[in-house]
Image (cartoon, grey):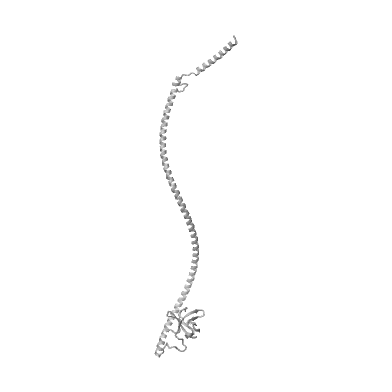
Amino acid sequence: MTLLGKSFSVVILILSAVFMVLALAVNASHRNWRDVVVTGVDGQPGLKDQIESISRENDQLRDSKDRIQSDLNREQAARRTALAALQTQLDTLQTTLQASEQSVQQLTAQLTVLSQTDLSRAEELERLTAENSTLRSQIRTEQQDRDTLFTETLTLTDQMNTLRGFKQELEVRNQQLIAQATRYKEVMTSKGIDVNEPLDGAPPDRNGNILQIDRPSSLVLVSIGYDEGLRKGHLLEVTRNGRYMGKLKVRNTEPDRSVAEILDDYSEGILQEGDRVDTTIE
C-alpha cells in the first residue's frame, strides 16, 4: 500500500470516528417534541400547559390591570378633585395672605404712628412729671403758707376777740359819753350857750385827711396846716365813713400840713391813711 492510500485510510478512520461521535450526540440530544409540547419531559409540564398557564396568568394580570386601571382612574379623579379643592384652598390662602400682608402693612403703619404717639406721650409725661414736681413744691409752699396764715388767723382771731371785748367796753363808754353829752347839751340849752360859737384859741371849722402814719411813734401827717388856722395843741377828730375812729393832738404845723399825735385814750379803731380829719364834729 502506498503512502497516499495509507493517508486516505487514516482520514477515513478519523472521519468515521467523527461521524460516530456526531451520531451519538444527535441521538443523545434527540427529543420527542410532542411529549415536550403535550405531556412534558423530566417532570416539567408541557409547553401547551405552560402556554395555557401563562394565558390564564395573562388573563388574571389583564383583569388585575383593568381593576388597577379602574382604581387608578378613580384615584386620579379623586386626586384631581382633591387637587381642585387644594387649588381652591390655595387661592383662598393666597387671598388671605394678600389680605394679611395688607393688614400687616396697615398694622406697621399704625405701629409707626403709635410709636410716634408713644414718644410724644413719653415727652409729655416727662413734662407733666416736671410740672408735677413743680406743683408738689408749690403745694408744699402753699401748705406752709396756709399753716402760716392759719397761725396768723388764730392770732388775729385772738386779737379780734380782744378787740370785741374792747369794743364792748367802748360801746358802754360811748353810751355813757352820749348820756353825758346829752346832759351837757341840755345844760347849755338851759343856760343859753351856743355850742357852735368858736372859743378863744379854738381852731376854725376845717377838715382834711390823714396822709401818712408812723405807728411806732404814734404820729400822723394830716393835710391841713398853719394856713388853715391850725396851731400846736389843737385837737382833731378822726372819722371813717361817718364812724368815729379817734382823736389827734397837733404837735407841729406847716403851711399846708401838720404833724399830730394819736391819743390812745380816745382811739376806737386802727387809724388808716385817707381817714377824714375835722377840727370839730357836730
**From the viewer's perspective, is 134 left or right of 85?**
right
Q: Percent from the top left, x then y, of residue 254? A: 50, 84
Q: Percent from the top left, x then y, of residue 23? A: 51, 16
Residue furthest to the right in view is 3
Task: Using the image as rendered, state which of residue 94 and residue 58 is in the foreground.
Answer: 94
Q: In this view, does 110 lie above or below 267?
A: above
Residue 15, picture quadrant:
top right
Q: Percent from the top left, x then y, of residue 194? A: 41, 89
Task: Using the image as rendered, state which of residue 186 and residue 279 is in the foreground.
Answer: 279
Q: Quadrant of the C terminus?
A: bottom left
Q: In this view, does 58 lie above or below 18?
A: below
Residue furthest to the top in view is 1
Q: Percent from the top left, x then y, of residue 250? A: 49, 84
Q: Is residue 22 above or below residue 160?
A: above
Residue 51 appears in the picture as rendered? yes
Which residue sits at x=47%, y=74%? 156
Residue furthest to the bottom in view is 191
Q: In which quarter of the image is the N terminus?
A: top right
Which residue sits at x=43%, y=24%? 51
Which residue sits at x=46%, y=50%? 105
So how many labels did they put on this image? 0
Residue 270 appears in the picture as rendered? no
Task: Using the image as rendered, state which of residue 177 and residue 195 is in the foreground.
Answer: 195
Q: Is residue 221 above or below residue 28?
A: below
Residue 13, picture quadrant:
top right
